[in-house]
Amino acid sequence: MRAYTVGQINLYIKNMFRQDFVLNKVIVRGEISNCKYHTSGHIYFTLKDETGTIAAVLFAGNAKNVGFRLENGMKVNVSGRIDIYERDGRYQLYVNSVEAAGMGDLYRRFEQLKAELEEMGMFAQEYKKPIPAFARKIGIVTASTGAAIQDIINISRRRNPYVQLILYPATVQGDEAKYSIVKGIRRLDSMGLDVIIAGRGGGSIEDLWAFNEECVARAIFDAATPIISAVGHETDFTIADFVADMRAPTPSAAAELAVADITGIEGAIEQYRSGLNSAMNYKLERMRMMLEQRAAKLKYLSPESKLNENRQITADYEDRLNRAIKSVVTLKRHELAIKAEKLHGLSPLTALKGGYAYVEDDVGRPVRSIGDVSPGNNIRVNVTDGIISACVTEVSAADSNERS
C-alpha cells in the first residue's frame, strides 16, 4: 500500500470538509468557555454543552461586528464553517457572527454568588489589608507542578533571592480542589507569613471554578495574612479576585507585586546613603563655620582679650602720663632755675659778699632803722664769714641829702 505524508492526509480531510455542504455553513449553539482575546484582535474560545466541546475562532475582521464582549459562561448561537487547521491536524469552528442566547449555568452561579457576597460586604475596600512593601516570607497555595509555581519561583529569585517561599501543594482543579485550597490558606495563615499568593494558571471556567466556591472566598476573607489572588489570565475573573486583598492578573504578576526588587531597594538605599552623606557634610560645614565664628566672637569677648586690651590701654596711659610728667618736671625745673637765679640775686648772702652786712639786735630781730636800737644796746653784725658783736654808742639820723 502507498504511504501518505501527514500533510497529505490533513489536506485530504480538509478537502472533504470543504466539500460538505452542511459544514460550510452551520449554526452551533453552546456555552462559551476558555475565552481569550488576542492582541491582534482575534478571539479564541471553546463552545461546550453537556455532551462535548468544539474549538472556535473569531477573526478580528468579524469580531468588530459583534456588539458585545464575549465572556465565559455566556450561551451563544454562532454561525460559520467547520474546517481543518492543517498544521495541528485538528478541526475547529471558524465563526462569522455571534448572537447571545442566554447565560450558562456556571456563569449564572458565578453571578449569583458574587451578588450575595458583595451584599455581605466581603468585597468592601475597608476590609482590604495592605500588601507589605518588603515581604520576607511568602506563602503560595497552588499546584506543586505546572507553570504557575515555576513562574513565581523564577520571578522571586530574579527580584530578590533572599525571600523565603513556602508552598502548600494544593489541588486546584476538580471536586476536591476547594477543600484543598481552603486547607492551604488556613495552614499558611497560621504560620505568621507576610503575604500569601493563592492561584493557578489559566483554563476554562470549569478549570478555574474552585476559586469561585464560597468556602474559598470565606477562607480568604477570614485570613489575617494579606492575600493576593492570581487565578488564570488577565481576562479571567473569579470570586477569589474580588475577596482577596489584591488581584494579580497572572501568577507571574502576583510574584512581581509580592516580591520587592532588591536591585531597586539597593539603589534606593544607595541614593538615601548619598543624600544622607551630602546632608551630613553640609550640616558639618555649617556647624564648622558657626564654630569658627563663635570662637572668634568668644576670643574677642573673652576676659583675657579684655585684660590684654585694658593692659594696652593702661600702657598707653602710662606712657602718656610719663611723657606729661617729664614735660611738667622739665618745665618746673626750668622755672625753678629761673626763680633760683632770681632768688640768688636777691639773697642777703649775695649782698653780704658785696660788702654789705646784716644787723640784728640781741634777740635776733633785724635792725632796719635807727629807731630799732638805742645807745648801749648790744647788736650783732652778720658778715660773709661770721658775726661781729658790738654795742651801740651813738645813734644819729642820716642827712636828708644823703638819703636822696
Image (cartoon, rainbow, N blue to C red):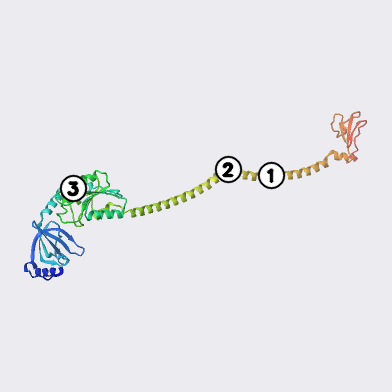
Q: Would you say residue 5 is visible in this rendering? A: yes
* x then y, percent, for residue 275: 40, 53
Q: Secondary structure at mark 3?
A: helix
Which label sits in the foreground, 1 or 2? 2
Q: Nearer the viewer, residue 54 or 13?
A: 13
Q: Identify the amino acid type marked 2.
A: Glu
* x then y, percent, for residue 298: 53, 45
Q: Which mark is residue 304?
A: 2
Which mark sits nearer the N-terminus, 1 or 3? Answer: 3
Q: Nearer the viewer, residue 1 or 283?
A: 1
Q: Are the residues at dot 1 and dot 2 in contact (C-beta closer than 8 Å)? A: no
Q: Residue at x 77, y 42 (%)?
A: 336
Which label sits in the foreground, 1 or 3? 3
Residue ID for mark 1: 322
Q: Identify the amino acid type marked 3.
A: Ser
Which mark sits nearer the N-terminus, 1 or 2? Answer: 2
The quadrant in which residue 66 appears is bottom left
Mark 1, other Cα within 10 Å: few <14 / some 14–19 / many ≥20: few
**Alpha carbon separation for disc pair 2 and 3:** 87 Å
**Alpha carbon separation for disc pair 1 and 3:** 113 Å
Mark 3, other Cα within 10 Å: few <14 / some 14–19 / many ≥20: many
Q: Secondary structure at mark 1?
A: helix
**Alpha carbon separation for disc pair 1 and 2:** 26 Å
Residue ID for mark 3: 180
* x then y, percent, for residue 186: 21, 44
The quadrant in which residue 345 appears is top right
Q: Identify the amino acid type marked 1.
A: Asn
Q: Secondary structure at mark 2?
A: helix
In the rendered structure, the answer to whether residue 107 lies left or right of residue 282 reads: left
Relative to 84, residue 249 above or below: above
